Image: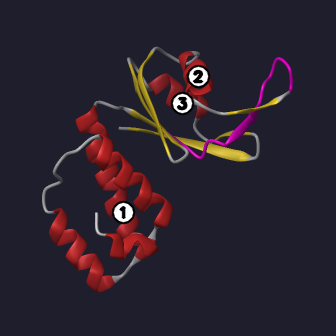
Amino acid sequence: MDPTLRYLAPKEHDRICELFAKYPCVYPGLDTHINILKILKMAPRYMALLEKLETFILKKAGFNFVLRNIPDYGELCETGQRSKVGYAEIRDTLNQFGKVINLEIVKGTVYAKFEDPTRCHKLINNMQMGTNIITTRLC
């Protein structure tokens, strides 16, 4: 990814760069898209490209579910204590909605591979977790 476009969407740019580093693949025509965006300098078009890249990488890596906007800390329902949200907490939560085969957390976004992600998507999309509204997407 071209670092000169990072200013258009810094958080998303960093997340996609990290995904590319973990799951290397070649997106067809990426150089052409990047060159056009260098000229246009339009954040919405760059965001759309990053979303396409994210979907492409996820399909190549075998993920089929995206969970966005998870908080850094969550409240445990049993004790009411605040706890850092990590792999164990996310896996435990998502396993309640279906069998999780693989899980990756990158910059506050969770990528998972479910046997069937549809049920989880229907149940937790636009749910509130702390002060955050989490969103989900199927790949």
Q: CA distance from mark 3 to mark 1?
A: 24 Å
Mark number displayed over residue 122: 3
Q: CA distance from mark 2 to mark 3?
A: 22 Å
- Amino acid type at circle 3 is Lys
Q: What predominant SS class does the magenta segment belong to?
A: loop
Q: Against 8, is 59 above or below?
A: above
Q: Against 64, is 94 above or below?
A: above
* Neighbour tally class for label 1: few under 14, some 14-19, many 20 plus, Cα within 10 Å: few
Mark number displayed over residue 136: none
Q: Is residue 2 toward the left or the right of residue 70 in the image?
A: left
User: Which residues fall within the magenta stretch?
Assistant: 67-80
Residue 29 can be seen, yes or no:
yes
Q: Nearer the viewer, mark 2 or mark 1?
A: 2
Residue 42, horizontal then vertical, whole percent: 38, 79
Residue at far bottom of view: 39
* Residue marked by disc 2: 88
Q: Quadrant of the N terminus?
A: bottom left
Precedes in sequence: disc 3 or disc 1: 1
Q: Against 72, is 92 above or below?
A: above
* Residue marked by disc 1: 48
Label 2 with label 3: CB-CB less than 8 Å: no
Asked if residue 69 lies in the magenta stretch, the reply is yes
Q: Is residue 14 toward the left or the right of residue 29 in the image?
A: right
* Rendering quarter of residue 127: top right
Residue 107, horizontal then vertical, whole percent: 51, 48
Name which residue lies at 16% across and 51% down: 26
